[in-house]
């Protein structure tokens, strides 16, 4: 199984902007692309009962994205969401909600972005394995990518 996810700079910037704009609510959306290249982050409405502490992608947007993919559009590779008051890693609730389908989960919190793969028997909460993040320009990052403007983003 691939242990690195390749992100376009546009997709990463879009997820970070969405997280900042949604604060203090959880932002969420879909990661679209081909194979392991996330080319686009598609903003979705968070329809969770309490979007301050949970996310639920609007099912209409999710179904529409899968239909576009079946018609030759970009594949749905996974999802992203923010943790406005938690760490940049999947929570136990995320693990309970995640299907072990190999999808990529990008989580933004505290000025960081981390990537995870939802699998059966993952190393975190029995559901997620960490992924390294690489930029489309070929530069590799640590597992956690600092957000622009962070003190350690040089």
Image (spheres, rainbow, N blue to C red):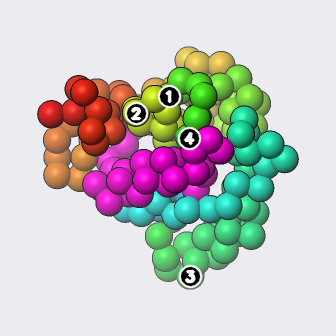
Q: Earlier in the sequence, mark 1 or mark 2?
A: 1
Give the residue furthest to the right.
Answer: 49
Q: CA distance from mark 3 to mark 1?
A: 34 Å
Q: Secondary structure at mark 4?
A: strand
Q: CA distance from mark 1 to mark 2?
A: 9 Å
Percent x, y for residue 139? 16, 41
Q: Earlier in the sequence, mark 3 or mark 1?
A: 3
Position of residue 147 relative to residue 121, above or below, is below
Q: Which residues are magenta?
A: 1-29
Question: Label 4 neighbourhood size at 10 Å, few (<14), some (14-19), many (20+)?
Answer: many
Percent x, y for residue 144? 36, 29
Position of residue 38 relative to residue 140, above or below, is below
Q: Secondary structure at mark 1?
A: loop
Label 2 belongs to which residue?
Answer: 111
- Front label number (3 vs 4): 4
Label 3 belongs to which residue?
Answer: 71
Question: Label 2 neighbourhood size at 10 Å, few (<14), some (14-19), many (20+)?
Answer: some
Residue 57 in view here = yes
Residue 88 - label: 1
- Front label number (3 vs 1): 1
User: Quarter holding the N terminus?
Assistant: top left
Label 4 belongs to which residue?
Answer: 82
């Amino acid at each position: 199984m691939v242990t690195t996810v390749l992100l376009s700079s546009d997709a990463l910037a879009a997820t970070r902007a969405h997280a900042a704009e949604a604060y203090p609510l959880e932002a969420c959306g879909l990661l679209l692309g081909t194979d392991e290249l996330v080319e686009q982050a598609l903003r979705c409405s968070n329809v969770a009962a309490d979007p301050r502490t949970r996310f639920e992608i609007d099912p209409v947007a999710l179904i529409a994205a899968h239909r576009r993919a079946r018609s030759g559009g970009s594949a749905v590779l996974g999802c992203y969401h923010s943790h406005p008051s938690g760490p940049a890693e999947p929570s136990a609730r995320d693990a309970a909600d995640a299907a072990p389908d190999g999808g990529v989960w990008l989580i933004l919190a505290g000025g960081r972005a981390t990537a995870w793969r939802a699998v059966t028997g993952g190393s975190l909460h029995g559901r997620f394995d960490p992924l390294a993040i690489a930029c489309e320009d070929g530069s590799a990052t640590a597992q956690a990518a600092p957000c622009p403007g962070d003190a350690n983003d040089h």
